[in-house]
Image (spheres, rainbow, N blue to C red):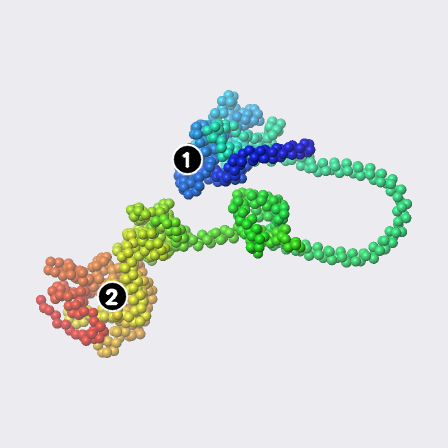
Amino acid sequence: MKIKKSHKTFLLIGGIIVTTLIFMLDFPLVSQALNENRRVLFISSYSESFPTVPQQIKGIQSALDKNVSLEIEYMDTKRLDTPENKQLFYKNLAYKLTNLPPYDAVLVGDDNALQFMMDYHTELFPGIPVVFFGINDLERGRKAAENPYFTGMIEKFSMVETIEIANKFNPQATKVVGIVDSTLTGQGDQGQFLATQNAFSDLEFKVLNVSDYSFEEFGQTLESLDNDVILLFLSMNQDDTGIFMSLNDQYRFLKEHTAVPVYRTSIGGIGEGIFGGKLIDYEAFGRTSGNLVMEILNGKSVETMSLIEETPYYYIFDYDLVKKFNIPVSLIPQNAVLINKEVSPFEKYREIFIGIGVIMIFLLIVSVILIVDNIKRRAIQRELRASYEKLKTTNEDLAKTEDKLRDQYEVIEKSLMEVGILNQKYAIATEITNSAVWELDLETKDVQLAENFSLIANRLINKKENIDDLLNLLTDTEHKNQLKSEINAYLEGRKQEINIQIPIEDEYHEIKWILIRGRGLSQGDGKINQIYGILMDTTKMKEQEDYIEYLATHDYLTMLPNRMSFLEKLATVMAADKPGAVLLFDIDNFKGINDTQGHVYGDEILKKIADRLSRTANEKMFVSRLGGDEFLILIENVSSKQEITEIAQKIKTAFDESFILDGKANFINISMGITCFPDDSNDINQIIMNADTAMYHVKHSGKNNYIFYQNKMKDVMNTKIEIEAILREALKTDGFKLLYQPQVDLCSAEIYGFEALLRLKDHNIRPDQFIPVAEDTGLIINIGRWVAKTAIEQFARWREKGLGEKTIAINYSSKQLRDKDFIIYLTQLTKANKVKPELIEIEITESILLENNNETMTFLAELKEVGFKIALDDFGTGYSSLNYLTYIPVDKVKLDKSINDKFLNLKNNRVMDSLILLAHSLNLKITAEGIEEWEQYLQLKRAGCDYIQGYLFSKPLESTEAEEIFNHIFAMAED
């Protein structure tokens, strides 16, 4: 038999060689075409973990030539059979097809994938041949085959044969019950099931649709089935409540709720509760479809290829259930696969029994030989006696060397013990480091691997493999070539050792990363014939590296790309000479959310904003977080300003809806700056600065808006930068000074006090120009302390000169709330200069109440507790509300010049009278600012105003000038 097999093998190999030579000689152009790389796409209706899919892929790959690249896309409709999932799959695939080379052919597996291809073939794959298989819906398959670009195979469940064998096992059966669901595949299953009933006139067919029940109700229904039922499991993925059940859970469910054999015509579940049946051979399905693709790629026209309606099958049963239901083994088809069947002792130990027989025959032959040998031995005994004396002499010689041998044995025994210890150390080291040794023979190209490499690779690996076969099994072509290049570089002396990390695929298609290190072992001639090294599993380290890389390129809070990722993306787009725009925005008054609700709350708001931005973005937008409450958005491949404006408006509109957090609606406004490239700049840093400049312009123009960058904005920013530099220099070089404007008491005409006004010594820059810059840059903190120190020390100097004590008013910016120790600093100054706190008046503006109401009220309460006076400055200009006066602890209200100019006339004096009357009713003093005319003075006096400040009496004065009028009594006009 072996000779015949060898002869057949020899003939087969010879035939292949001859055919190949003829093919190469007669068809050189065809051979060349076959060597070109081809790309084939396989679209599966399911996921890669679905039981049939790996077998389909294995069959396809076995049929495709090595030069044909197979790529796979999964629709995952078994778990997510929804329009939304299919639309997302369409968008993702359309994007890839737009940016990748076209395919030479497309394979589609099962009904959903075929329907998708029928819907989008003209749009996504125009003119590309399509091979389909595994189609349950016969009509859909036949309709698809009418397309000149489509051909394939119909999947017909072997229901007739399965029901026949089930009826053979259970002759008392009167009905057949088919379990289906309402998915697209389930509908095809139901159609094939009902079409089968014509072959069984004596059996009643009934459909149980799990989508009409809840799983609990369906289990009760299954438990009620009698022994006269043949139960056929086709599909039961989803019940009427929408709950999805995985296949493994389906097998357990059927096992728990059925008392009759459950038959199946599709793969999966045999041995897990399913009895068995005549199943479809999905690997053969894939192999046949792959052969069809190869025929097409080799030039065969799709139109000439008929629809294949034959399906490959095989019988399989669970032997444990065969015994459980007392089914005679004789009824089972001869070629059926029986799982869980114990092998008989003879089958199990067949080779041992044969070995024993051979040994017995051998012993018999040996016995015969011994008998013959015994006869010969007697003949030579005489010769042995003669040589005995000679042997005796030899024995004496051997005895002399025994001691030497014993010493050598002890040395060998000690060496073996040391080798054993080294082996133990080696085993511990490889186990701890999850590594294995390898050896490559450069002449035979064979690689030997330690046994534990199979554990590392998580698949069965022979100890000795051809290196090409091993790499083809474990990794892809790209990494295979990288490893070979690494080995060649070492052999050529360009590297000191082999040191490379490549991915491999285990038995379950999971990726593991392996570090390969090694060096050669040279012979006496210096030539390297073998390479030895170590293989180490570095998967966890690789995952940590990938995670660290992800953290380095993404914002830790929002998981959006960070500034570094944004700049890399912007550089890539600009290098490709694509036009676009950069949008930079931040959250208006976000500090108020952090201060009132806490930073944790603020972080959650930022997460919600990031999520909404991600959902708002399209394929042209790249959203990232710059830091804090600032976000950067890149719009690529857009040159139309109108389109950029529409996108900016879309982003702004996304903030119209409130952000709900902890049951509270948070309404968010943004200020956005926009710059276009290459129109505004080709420099990345300048582009970011332009966007920031535009955003700054929005911030100082009312917020809650967006604006495009203009070159003139740079002048504003440059001015701001220049002023900032002047302010910083002034802080270092005593470049500030205070002027003092008197506040006159209307009753006594005496100076009640002075307001300290900040000025720059060497620059003619107005306070309304440099104060906002100081607030924006945070310099207001140090400047505010300088003003307080200088004013209080001036108060002390006037007192020491004998001029007396008068109130000094100090302006306080809302941004100084960040100076948490300001009150402590003020208190220390007053104590150091022996100044009563009630003679220091802190002037605040209404804007301070918008920063953080709770923090502001605490600050004002602490000022009052120490004893400082508080005045509400610029009343009537911004967010003036008379309601403020009822709860903020102020002592005085200062009417702004604008409100005085507006209401100090004969027609509107009642308004002014009412304001003053209201303040007095709240026990508040009134100071009118910006008074320049006697008529205004007279109206204020008649209304009962307490103090006047303005050019009518004095402009702001140097400290020496203020000393000259310190105790002056002004002459007042009379009515």
Count the numbered circles shown: 2
- The mark that comes first in sequence, 2 or 1, is 1
Q: Which mark is residue 765?
A: 2
Q: Which residue lies furthest to the top in this view?
A: 201
Residue 858 is situated, as x and y percent measured from the top left of the image, at 31, 62
Q: How far across and how far down the image is residue 65, in percent?
A: 53, 37
Image quarter hosting the N terminus? top right
Q: Which residue is drawn at 33% across and 52% down?
A: 678
Farthest residue toward the bottom?
Answer: 801
**Mark 2 neighbour class, 10 Å CA radius: few under 14, some 14 to 19, many 20 or more:** some
* Near-viewer residue (212 or 716): 716
Q: How crowded is mark 1: few (under 14 residues within 10 Å), some or many (20 or more)?
A: few
Label 2 to label 1, Cα distance in Å?
Answer: 70 Å
Residue 250, position in %: x, y?
50, 36
In terms of image quadrants, where is residue 929?
Answer: bottom left
The reply to whether residue 194 is in sight is yes
Residue drawn at x 42%, y 36% as measured from the top left: 125
Name the residue type under label 2: Ile
In the rendered image, residue 298, in percent from the top left (x then y), is placed at 50, 34
- Mark 2 in CB contact with mark 1 (< 8 angstroms): no
Residue under numbered circle 1: 126
